Image (cartoon, grey):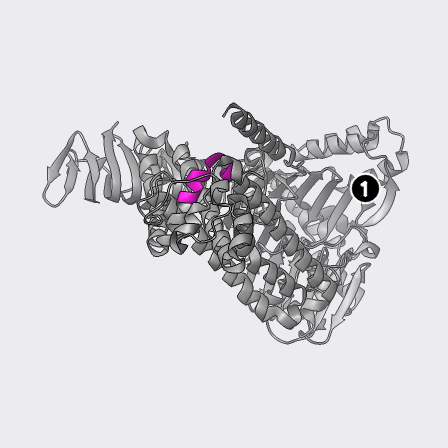
Amino acid sequence: MRKVMWYTALLLFVGLVIPSTLTGQAAQAVDEVVQTAVVLSGDEATLDLELASGRSQQVRFSDGIVYIDGREAGSYQPGGSLESAWRDFLRNVSSGELSEALLELANADLDNGGAVDAIAGALAPYMSQSSSGITVDVSSEVSAEMAAEINRAVEEATAAAAIATAQLEGLEEIIEGGLVIELAELEGLAQSLGRVGIAPEIEGILNGDSPLRVIIEADDYMLPSGAWLGETLILVETDGVIAGTVSGDVLVAEGSLLITPSGMIEGDVIGVDASIQNEGTIVGDLRSAEGFAPFVLAPGISNIRMARRGPSVVGNIWSGFGSLAKTIAMYLLFGFLGALVVYFFRNNLETVSDTVSYSFGRSFLTGLAAEILFLPIGLVMTVLIVTAIAVPFYALAFLLLGLLGYVGVAHAAGENLTRRRFSSTARMRRSNSYYYVLNGIGVLLALFVGAAITEMAYPVLGWAHDILIASAWILTWVAATSGLGASVLSRAGTQRKFARPGELPALPFDSFAEDNTPYEGVRAARYRTGDKGDEI
Amino acid sequence: MRSKTSIATAITLALLAGSVATAEAQSWKTINKSRKRRSQEFLDVKIKYAVGRFEVSRGSDNQLYRLDSRYDEDVFNLTSSYLESDRRGQLVIDIDGKNDLDDVDYDYEAGHLRLDLTGETPLSLSMKFGAAEARLDLGGLRLQNLLLETGASDTHVSFSEPNRETAEYCTFKAGAAAFKVEDLGNSGCEDISVSGGVGKLALDFSGKWKNDAKADINVGLGTIEISVPAELGVRIDKSTFLMSFKAPGFEKQDGGVWVSRNWDTAKHRLTVSVSGAFGGVTVARL
């Protein structure tokens, strides 16, 4: 009996009190909080309440300024007592203790009373609601069926309130604050969106060729019942209510949208980090488009961060210099590693170099086979418990063999370059492994340098850049593969089975300093000098 | 020789010191979102999570969902959208790297995502992880179907309470991963599919069975451990290559089929198809 009475009272409340809100101030009474969001980071602490009417209430602490619904409401000292209290409050809100948390905040002994009062005033209408529970607790007083019925009635009344509000305002769009951008055609869309910091990828999810209406950071957007918007509508960081008809698509980014029962969207409705509730009609699809680059709008409209649509001329030059710097860094790194290899393992390196020079095809195929088999062998080792412990060593050995091989290829390239460029006397002066390796790495990275230079003039030489960069990577892969194969064939440079035939033992550099008439095929081998001769 | 060793040691230490010095500070961001359960009749949940710890469980029935996340905002983007139409909601959560994560020095274990879901609204759950440590307790939900894809992750799924719906299908796809599912009998899934690339699959079919089910289990390289309750009738159809197979207590029939002795009398039956290339399969009766 008691349940029935309580149920009746609730229905009376829904039936009598709520309709009165359609014409007056009591609309807030049913503006239920449906979603609570708390964001905490190093420089931001935000509470965002999404209301059933499609509106939202936001309080944000950012960089010393307190914003309420995007407007400055006061200031705070970063790291001070007010910010600490606010962050504590938000943590309590996260735990579902909204009312108690606000009470604590209001009673706290804080310097900045004005900001606190403003916050309390903004949030007070919602403090009687649980931050997480539904309006009627299903488990307590009434049956689930009754509760569902009551909630449904409340929702319908809420939607009716939104419609009535819209009707009272007339048939024009209502936009409070924010920035409105009109675009007559989609052709310049990406560039235009880029200017206001919206990711150009958005272009890809819009279809059709209707003009665009972009609303950015408005406090509220409303299209009343009976109104017609013949454009594609984009709401960015804006909460909207649509009770009328939109002929194009609607995109909502970092905001919320309520489509009331009289609302109709003739295109698609797309949400990006958004909350969309449809009680009307969507002719197209309702879908989300996650995974796009973030929007980069700053807190205030005046602070919109400009995003570059595409690389400018200066940008291309900078980008080219960046690539050049990376290539130089790579040269220095490999030069350093190559010098280490020469210093510690010169004999092994020379054997690998000779192997790749004289058995290039065999080395390449062996390297290719090693690359293909690397993963399966590793997996088998992983599965077999006994060998699992050796997997890191296996990977390290593969890496070191690859490095030895790449440096060996550089050595061979440098040696061949020296042999072709200089006369025998000059060649001998340059015949040491450090010289070979540093020159060889330069040869292997030369295409990257060319690619970096052409990148600076990408609009004109883009085709050349693309060809050069592709060629550079192919050359790098071929060098690494054949070097790896040579390392494997020569057992890390310990066996000369596939190296130069008729090899002479290494002799000191000075022994050959005056020898200008050696047998050509053997001469280069004789330049493999002793420890003293190679050091620089 | 001694001097070379000293130089090598010094270079190694210098490189290590350099790598430590390049570790960058991280900008942590926490996001908590909760939405009231109102009159939604269905919720479609889609989650894509790059790296970090990931947890899903049943939360307060008054909340449709509750999301708690902590991540490095310099490295990752989090977007979450909630769309509702005709009392059918869709929740899409996406945490993905801003750049190539291979180039980032990042403490992957420090980031997390926790999602609590209502036990009152029927759900479809679709989740995709990268390299994550995932703990999912899907017990007590109203799960109508489930799709779970993991990359290189340590994933532990359990159904601590019976599913309050009959699930049409439960599909698990594991890459190179340690993958464990407990109390699958509580899942209420009629069609279970588990596939793994490389790694260890441990599937426990305990729980309160309320329907017959079939399970397709496939692994490329690794071990499969299957546990089935004694009262469940089980038939195993094996199609493997270079895989050991142990099923004590089962009767072998023609065509690579093993059947539990209670197959004809059991109240509920599970038909399992096992296929794989390398490794081993063990079936244990509980």
Residue A288 visible within the image: no
Say which amino acid is labelled 1: Asp
Q: Residue at x 72, y 53 (%)?
A: A55
Closer-to-camera residue (B246/B158): B246
Q: Residue at x 29, y 36 (%)?
A: B223
In the picture, the quarter occupied by the C terminus of chain A is top right
Residue B96 x, y percent position in the rendering: 56, 48
In the picture, the quarter occupied by the N terminus of chain A is top right
Residue A414 x, y percent position in the rendering: 51, 52
Q: Secondary structure at mark 1?
A: loop
Residue located beneath label 1 in the image? A63
Secondary structure character of the magenta stretch overall: helix
Residue A232 x, y percent position in the rendering: 67, 70
Residue A173 x, y percent position in the rendering: 77, 67
Q: In the displayed structure, does residue B58 sit left or right of residue A127?
A: left
Q: In the displayed structure, does residue A184 sit left or right of residue A387?
A: right
Q: In the displayed structure, does residue B92 sit left or right of residue A250?
A: left
